[in-house]
């Protein structure tokens, strides 16, 4: 009952966030910098071309009307037509999303798979050599930018050993494994810095939980130190870890813009980069909205995960 | 038949001795009380018995439980022993349970860990144990989480975990220190009853001598890691061979001599104060409920009067205190200081803060550790229109420090260099420095050891003699309130249910709640004798 109410509340706040985000994006792109059509065509545009583009973009309608047309279009899957490519944005995005979302998720999974054991290992050996080793490695992971990792990975695994392709994406129709292979190096490059941060969060969260009174109660029951950590420590330590995982997803999305360039992947990051260069505001607007949607959705899922982990949150407003 | 025998036990943590040559024993069915002030090694004795000492601890000596020598057992043998042969109950019921597991699961875990029961059986046994400690499943389903229970109920769950397998030895470390008096009485009765029923040996660790005297068969008094005196209860209370034991009992019953208050002339008046909190909505579109923390509270505090405020946790005394200090918005009523309404605008709030000061409970958390004591004490000066500077400021700081029996040189030191009692003196100096008309003591002596508490109470009495001090003394400790106040307010569920001269209320309580409170508070049996002594001396 409490859980249902919690989900309902979170859903409400999800919808509200999306509404606010769409308003902000719409305002920033369409209203603030003057006339989008003249901005897209540059200063030397002919008046006729400008008028034609304005009509095509529907700029002659009122601002409120345009906002609703835009939102309504997105809700029905119509993101408009790209000005530079003359193809529906929906089609372009659909192609690219099949690269970017698997890449971000792959990186997220890798980062969690690296961070949880590493954090657990470091926390259980606090102050010992293993802990210091993990801390040192995470220090480097945080300090080194992901594109440098990307280049090193390419040098070692693609050029020297030829285990993975150095770049490009075969497309999902070429088979699952070929795609996973193409995404592995970029995902590792994206995941390493995030894993370093997450390891540190995991370690400190666990150390904090280790000092809690209920851990002592668990030891007094007769659980061994290891059992106490697994049965009582882990789930309590997950709460701060989840927060960071949620935040990281948006960083991963931003990170894909650079990584997709390095690995020549046809993803959303590349699309947005190209569209900004080509001043294709229709595409920029839609892709930004999609990314915002993705991030808000992930945070919604994190909120649900919180409540699943911590019963105290279910009754909160 | 001796069950636990601790023989010449010494423990040092990173080279610092915490227990020195300690010997104790307790028989099955016996209640041993371990008492002493903070840092005396009571909890360390418990942890040593559980063999759960912090890392860096070096143990010498022997601990026998029945035929087993605990300091020689392997970790896995100890794990098999903890929870099955020795159960332990801790001080902080609010944090002693895992917040993300149901109470039933936490009790069942002990059972499944040590016996070959399946999940269903373990759940049934857990429900049985919870019923035994007063949490029957029809009223307290085992599917509840700890945060859905009160402090006393949580402590019952911790006790259920400890006794689920009927251990031979139960150790309770300050099991009721964090609880209200009425809850304390019930929990203590429960612990002793369980110990008697199952013929367990019970080690009760507490700083509260009244509790000790009431429940224990045998008392051991500890100081600086040693047992200074140990005897059967009747004998110990009667003889008190060691001067430290006598000092402890005297300090617990310490009474101060307050000067007579001047003729009543109203200083602070509270009229029909009301503070309500909005509760979260139960359902969408439903009108949210309201929790009234303070309901229609009125009282007058005369200049030079020492007023007490007692009540259990959640009764609204903290909210009322915060409202008086302007830290909590009121939904109704008015606070006036000598007829002038307070907290109406910025100017009247500032004036109120200048004329009222507060001393809080926690002597460790209420100071900025990076400021010198001089700077900490001089903090309230910013409330003055023309704060003293230079030599005048230093003089004022020195005077405030001397007032609380510290030295002017202490102004240069930092707060971590002082003990808990000294910090509370510094807090009082900070409150005194701008010569406020009213000081609010919010559980100001509750965190202190009895001997230190007695000294601080004496200091208060002395300050009352030197200055005409007016204060509101908020405490859950009835003995202390009785000693340092002229008049007392008893608060329950947001209302003041009884009000009167302190002695009158304590000797002849009118309201049933006051009677319950007084009856639940443990009494020192030697109270009358020691009280008489200190009055003469």
Image (cartoon, rainbow, N blue to C red):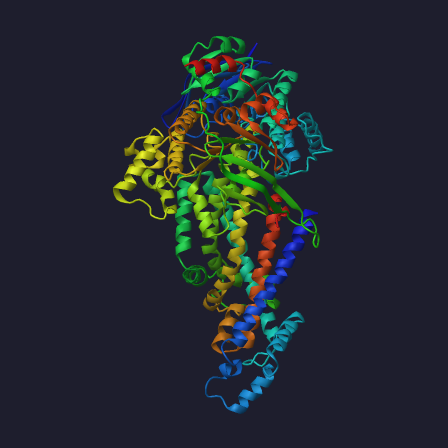
Say whether residue A40 is visible: yes
Which of the pair B470/A92 is nearer the observer? B470
In this rendering, the answer to whether B312 lies above or below B527 is below
In this rendering, the answer to whether B85 lies above or below A295 is above
In this rendering, the answer to whether B329 lies above or below A57 is above
**Residue B396: percent from the left, percent from the top?**
31, 38
Q: Look at the image and tell me in which quarter the N terminus of chain B lies.
A: top right
Say whether residue A170 is visible: no
Classify residue B251 by image quadrant: top left
**Residue A203: percent from the left, percent from the top?**
47, 44
**Residue B508: percent from the left, percent from the top?**
60, 22
Q: Residue furthest left?
A: B391
Which of the pair B279/B157 is nearer the observer? B279
Which of the pair B449/B21 is nearer the observer? B449
Q: Residue at x 33, y 41 (%)?
A: B375
In this rendering, the answer to whether B327 lies above or below A260 is above
């Amino acid at each position: 009952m409490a859980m249902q109410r919690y989900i309902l509340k979170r859903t409400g706040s999800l919808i509200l966030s999306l509404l606010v985000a769409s308003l902000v994006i719409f305002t920033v792109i369409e209203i603030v910098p003057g006339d989008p059509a003249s901005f897209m065509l540059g200063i030397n545009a002919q008046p006729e071309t400008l008028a034609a583009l304005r009509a095509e973009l529907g700029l002659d309608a009122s601002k409120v009307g345009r906002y609703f047309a835009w939102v309504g279009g997105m809700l029905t899957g119509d993101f408009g037509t790209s000005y530079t490519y003359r193809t529906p944005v929906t089609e372009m995005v659909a192609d690219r999303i099949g690269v970017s979302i698997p890449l971000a998720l792959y990186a997220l999974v890798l980062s969690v798979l690296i961070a949880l054991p590493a954090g657990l290992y470091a926390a259980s050996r606090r102050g010992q050599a293993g802990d210091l080793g993990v801390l040192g490695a995470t220090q480097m992971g945080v300090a080194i930018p992901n594109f440098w990792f990307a280049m090193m990975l390419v040098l070692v695994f693609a050029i020297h050993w030829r285990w993975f392709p150095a770049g490009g994406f075969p497309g999902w129709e070429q088979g699952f494994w070929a795609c996973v292979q193409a995404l592995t190096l970029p995902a590792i490059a994206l995941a390493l810095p995030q894993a370093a941060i997450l390891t540190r969060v995991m370690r400190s969260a666990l150390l904090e939980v280790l000092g809690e009174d209920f851990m002592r109660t668990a030891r007094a029951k007769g659980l061994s130190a290891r059992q106490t950590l697994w049965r009582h420590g882990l789930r309590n330590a997950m709460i701060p870890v989840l927060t960071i995982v949620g935040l990281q997803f948006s960083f991963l999305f931003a990170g894909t813009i650079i990584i997709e360039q390095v690995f020549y992947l046809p993803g959303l990051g590349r699309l947005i980069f190209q569209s900004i260069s080509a001043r294709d505001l229709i595409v920029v607007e839609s892709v930004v909205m999609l990314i915002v949607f993705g991030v808000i959705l992930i945070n919604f899922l994190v909120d649900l995960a919180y409540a699943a982990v911590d019963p105290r949150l279910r009754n909160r407003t | 038949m001796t069950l636990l025998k601790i023989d010449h036990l010494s423990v040092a943590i990173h080279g610092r001795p915490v227990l020195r040559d300690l010997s104790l024993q307790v028989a099955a069915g016996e209640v041993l009380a371990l008492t002493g002030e903070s840092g005396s090694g009571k909890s360390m004795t418990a942890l040593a018995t559980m063999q759960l000492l912090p890392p860096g601890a070096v143990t010498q000596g022997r601990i026998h439980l029945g035929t087993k020598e605990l300091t020689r057992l392997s970790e896995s043998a100890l794990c098999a022993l903890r929870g099955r042969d020795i159960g332990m109950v801790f001080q902080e019921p609010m944090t002693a349970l895992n917040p993300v597991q149901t109470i039933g699961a936490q009790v069942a875990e002990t059972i499944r860990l040590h016996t070959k029961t399946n999940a269903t059986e373990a759940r049934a046994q857990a429900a049985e144990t919870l019923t035994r400690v007063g949490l029957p499943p029809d009223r307290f389903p085992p599917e509840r989480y700890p945060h859905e229970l009160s402090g006393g109920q949580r402590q019952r769950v911790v006790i259920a975990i400890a006794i689920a397998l009927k251990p031979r030895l139960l150790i309770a470390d300050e099991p009721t220190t964090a609880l209200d008096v009425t809850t304390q009485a019930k929990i203590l009765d429960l612990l002793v009853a369980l110990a008697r029923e199952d013929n367990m040996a019970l080690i009760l660790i507490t700083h509260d001598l009244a509790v000790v005297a009431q429940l224990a068969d045998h008392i051991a008094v500890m100081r600086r890691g040693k047992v200074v005196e140990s005897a059967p209860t009747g004998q110990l209370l009667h003889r008190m061979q060691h001067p430290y034991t006598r000092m402890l009992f005297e300090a617990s019953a310490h009474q101060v001599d307050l000067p007579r208050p001047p003729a009543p002339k109203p200083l602070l008046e509270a009229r029909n104060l009301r503070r309500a909190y909005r509760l979260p909505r139960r359902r969408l579109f439903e009108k949210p409920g309201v929790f009234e923390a303070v309901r229609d509270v009125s009282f007058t505090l005369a200049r030079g009067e020492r007023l007490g405020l007692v009540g259990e946790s959640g009764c609204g005394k903290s909210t009322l205190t915060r409202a008086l200090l302007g830290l909590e918005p009121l939904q109704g009523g008015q606070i006036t200081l000598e007829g002038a309404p307070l907290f109406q605008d910025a100017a009247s709030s500032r004036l109120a803060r200048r004329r009222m000061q507060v001393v809080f409970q926690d002597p460790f958390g209420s100071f900025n550790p990076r400021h010198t004591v001089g700077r900490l004490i001089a903090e309230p000066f910013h409330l003055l229109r023309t704060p003293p500077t230079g030599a005048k400021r230093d003089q004022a700081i020195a005077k405030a420090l001397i007032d609380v029996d510290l030295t002017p040189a202490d102004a240069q030191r930092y707060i971590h260099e002082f003990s808990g009692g000294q910090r509370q003196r510094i807090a009082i100096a900070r409150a005194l420095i701008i010569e406020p008309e009213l000081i609010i003591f919010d559980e100001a002596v509750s965190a202190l050891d009895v001997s230190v508490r007695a000294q601080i109470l004496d200091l208060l009495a002395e300050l009352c003699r030197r200055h005409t001090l007016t204060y509101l003394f908020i405490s859950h400790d009835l003995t202390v309130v009785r000693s340092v106040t002229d008049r007392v307010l008893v608060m329950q569920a947001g209302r003041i249910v009884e009000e009167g001269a302190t002695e009158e209320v304590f000797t002849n309580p009118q309201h049933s709640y006051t009677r319950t409170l007084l009856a639940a508070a443990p009494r020192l049996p030697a109270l009358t004798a020691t009280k008489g002594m200190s009055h003469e001396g």
